[in-house]
Amino acid sequence: RLVKIVVHASIEFFQRVDMSNKMFIIHVAFGEQNMAFEPCLEDFLKVLSEMWSGTIQVVNSVPSFLTVRQYDPYITVHGTQSVESILQRNREFQHFHTAIRERTQSDIHMAQRYSDKNFAVFRKIHEYGLKWNEEEYLATPRTHEDLARDMATMKGFQDDLEKFK
């Protein structure tokens, strides 16, 4: 019965992952070369692994009715298996366990490609902002051409941001 509960939970979880495109929240920021995700793929996979390990540990710790002495006269047991060992060999559980992992990986890889492509235009703005030093800018003498070039750069940044809206 416990095996069926865990298998059913894995099916339900997969269905939620498969049908929802907004199940998790990922924060996106500019990384050194690509967009950086928090949590990253490895963190997601670690949490999924810990979730399944914890689930199996909980059901594995439920005492079997075979340990209740009042049933001794009615049953004969020749070796028992833990819920964990049964689940490790259960094709349905393993299928959905793997499918959840693969779907999570696929979705995060797709989100990575999407964000890298769509935010690439803003990287130059981000990098400009990282290098910006107001005190240095104000302390440096500027010609009319320098100011015009700086204003054109800011206008270009503004136009790029407007396109995204």
Image (tube, rainbow, N blue to C red):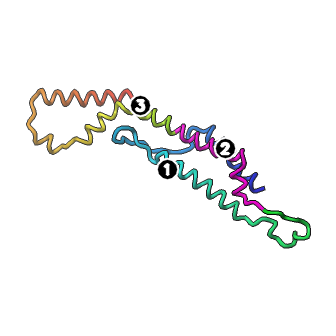
x 67%, y 61%: residue: 58
What's drawn in magenta, residue-wise? 80-107
Question: Crowdedness of circle 2 by 10 Å Cα count: few (<14), some, many (20+)?
Answer: many
Above or below: residue 30 compared with residue 65: above
Magenta segment: does it hold 102? Answer: yes
The residue that disc 1 covers is 43
Instruction: Measure the alpha-carbon separation of dots 3 and 1.
Output: 24 Å
Q: Which labelled disc corresponds to residue 96?
A: 2
Q: Nearer the viewer, residue 54 or 86?
A: 86
Question: Crowdedness of circle 1 by 10 Å Cα count: few (<14), some, many (20+)?
Answer: few
Above or below: residue 123 compared with residue 63: above
- In the figure, residue 113 lies in which quadrant? top left
Three-letter amino acid code of the residue under disc 1: Asp
The residue that disc 3 covers is 118
Instruction: Measure the alpha-carbon separation of dots 1 and 2.
Output: 20 Å
Percent of width and height locating residue 144: 10, 28
